[in-house]
Image (cartoon, grey):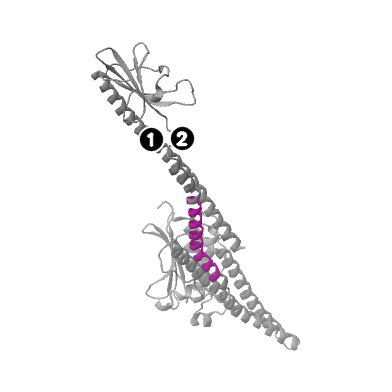
Amino acid sequence: MQLLSDQTNRVRVTVIAMVVTGFVAMLLYGALLAFIRFQADSQITTELGFTARQVGAIARSGHLTNPIVSGSPGLIQVQNDRRQVVAASRSLVGLSALRAPRPDVGHSLHQRICPGDRHRCFAAVTLRVITPAEPLTVYALAPEPGLFPRPGLAVVLTLGVPVGTAMVGVWRWWLAGRRLRPVELLRAELDEINAADLRRRISVPPRHDEFHSLVTAVNATLDRLEAAVEQQRRLVSDVSHDLRSPIAGLRAELEAALLDPEGADLRAALAKTLKNTERLQNIVTELLVLARRDAGLPGRAQPIDLGELAEREVARRPRRVLAKVDAEPGVVARVNDLDIGRVLTNLLDNAARHAESQVIVTVRRQNGDAVVEVFNDGEEIAPEDRDRIFERFIRLPASRERDSGGTGLGLAISREIATTYSGTLTVADGDCGARFVLTLPLLGQ
């Protein structure tokens, strides 16, 4: 199918080139014929003018004879003012006088004369002279050049149009094949690349032309595709690993309760089962949010007072450590309240899990940005781990020991949401504890 498409494009390009070449060749052919005709007319006019002046000089000297013997080209007829033929070339002797306009004395006139037979016309140069006897008019005539004054050249030009068009068609067919050959090679290499081996790349041509740019773009696309597939593979692997633990816990608790239903501590078993179920629910919820973000479906943005939003999220559900909100009034950003509410919830849950005694949420303006800072007085985060904690399914050993219920997705989702609204989410330096800083463009800046 692809080969058929390439051949169709090749034929189309060739036909277009031949049509354009044929049209241009016909225009040039017509222009050359017109130029040849113009040259022939100019040559005849020049020769007839010379003949008329030569006969006029003879007439002024009084030596005009009949018939006129002249070595110059053209037919000659000399008339007086009464339209009587005074002298003529040997082939025109006995013919009636030509009926054509006369110029003024001393002037010449170039005109077209069709005596009797309208299908046979002559180019004529008329000259009026004064002789010792009377004024005379000299007519120097020659047959008009036809449509093809030079038949041999016209035949060559006529044959040149189809021959030239055919040569251009062959050249364009060959050139199109040559230009499409890299596309064929590109297609062949792309066919060999599959999901099992995305590390292969297209061979980059040495010439820096449009195909070099095309191959570079294709390889860049393959790089992004490989990264996306690799991310999906890691996601599946990490999800499988994180789901295995709560599912195994649920199975173990249920099997233990079934083996000894009378002796098992039902309340403790149900508490462990509920904890594992909550972790499963958290993982599924975060995965749904992550899938929605990866699908490019951000929420509808509107002006939101971040201080009021922080107070609502703090009061929405109880946590192990009560959070305190210190917000400047009127810190507004154009965001979606559900998205930024999830960011604040993730930061508050993270801070509550690691805090010793307090969590402080600060909302303020800073350098034209809206800044939301969530501080907890727990352990500091090492500088080398401050970027790792924002990767998907990354949980530091200290976090796993302190709380096994986390999903490892909350901070990754929070940073992606912040980036969507042209903001940032980072870990800042502090004297003690962990300090997460969310910045968003301030409304009106």
What residue is rendered at 53% in x and 61% in y?
339
Viewer-proximal residue, 370 or 22?
A: 22
In terms of secondary structure, where does tag 1 sit? helix
* Residue extending furthest toward the top: 82
Q: Give the residue pinned by disc 1.
A: 40
- Can you give x and y, in whole percent of width and height, for residue 313 in the image? 53, 63
Give residue 82's quadrant in the image.
Answer: top left
Q: Local crowd at mark 1 within 10 Å, few (<14), some, or many (≥20)? A: some
Seen at 45% across and 40% down, the residue is 151
Q: Residues within 10 Å of mark 2 (few under 14, many from 20)?
A: few
Q: Mark 2 = which residue?
A: 147
**SS at badge 2:** loop
Q: Is residue 161 above or below residue 268?
A: above
Mark 2 vs mark 1, CA separation in Å: 11 Å
Q: Is residue 146 left or right of residue 62?
A: right
Q: Nearer the viewer, residue 407 or 49?
A: 49
Magenta stretch in the rendered image? 164-189
Q: Can residue 190 be seen here?
A: yes
